[in-house]
Image (spheres, helix red, strand yellow):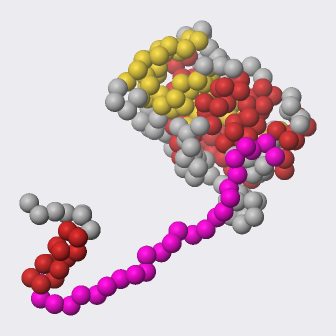
Amino acid sequence: MDAISGTLLRGGAGVKMNPYDLYAVETALRLREQYGGHIQVLTMGPPQAETVIREAFSMGVDSGAILTDPSFAGADVLATSYTLSQGVRKLGHYDLIICGKQTTDGDTAQVGQEIAEFLGIPGIANTRRIVDADDRSITVEMDMQDEVMTLKAGLPCLLTVEKDIFQPRLPSYRKKLETKERPIPRIGLQDLEDQDALHYGLDGSPTSVVRIFPPPSGTEREIWRDSGEALANALFERLAAQKFIRWA
């Protein structure tokens, strides 16, 4: 972590696909198997994020692109969503956008719906099952925790999918070899419709990290030595005094 900006230092780190996005990729593959179509993946990150695109290729994805530019660094959820929406606009026509439920680092579960808002299309979160689809609409089940809601949305639209929707397939070594030379375009600030650097990265982020610190460690301890019965009584009295348990 950068102690001043409060952002992740990604430059020299290895990358891998966000686990929740595996379910999004698998959902796209299942829909293509049933209805046909072309699957294109988009990620935002440093140049080494190409590894993530290659992993998607080995699962069966058709093409992919990377949003990468120094101007994008340090983006919060809103700036990340805006950058991705600009990348989608750059790629052109689409019928359906599928995102993972959330990332396993930030855990905000906001990016997908904010992309939909920036693009002006319907967004459905917590999709647990695809019920039906045609060339004009898609019907899905949305997990509402206490109940399940069935929704029908016109295309184009965006879904974020739960991890129970499908079991992701394993990458294929044969596909990995077949696609190792497949080009992966890099999209920078100069390629986007909105080229105002103040709308991206740290400058375009309305939220910021004030301070980074390790969690306090609980080092205080007591050691009791006595008979089993005496220790049990002492422990009971301590827990009762702190109101974790009470006398019947």
Q: Residue 192 placed where, x, y %?
A: 86, 32
Is 1 positioned to the left or the right of 149 in the image? right
* Residue at the extreme bottom: 225
Is 188 positioned to the left or the right of 104 in the image? right
For the N terminus, the image quarter is bottom right
The answer to whether residue 91 of the structure is visible from this angle is no
At x 35%, y 83%, the residue is: 221
Q: Quadrant of residue 89?
A: top right
At x 60%, y 9%, the residue is: 136
Q: Residue 106 placed where, x, y %?
A: 58, 49
The answer to whether residue 101 of the structure is visible from this angle is yes
For the C terminus, the image quarter is bottom left
Q: Residue 235 placed where, x, y %?
A: 19, 76
Q: Residue 230 placed where, x, y %?
A: 12, 84
Of residues 4 and 116, the one nearer the viewer is 4
Q: How many marks?
A: 0
Of residues 216 and 120, the one nearer the viewer is 216
Q: Over which residues does the magenta segment extend?
A: 203-228
- Relative to 24, is 222 above or below? below
At x 71%, y 27%, the residue is: 118
Is 231 positioned to the left or the right of 151 in the image? left
Q: Quadrant of residue 183?
A: top right
Give the overall secondary structure of the magenta segment: loop
The verdict on residue 37 being magenta is no
The verdict on residue 225 being magenta is yes
At x 84%, y 50%, the residue is: 70
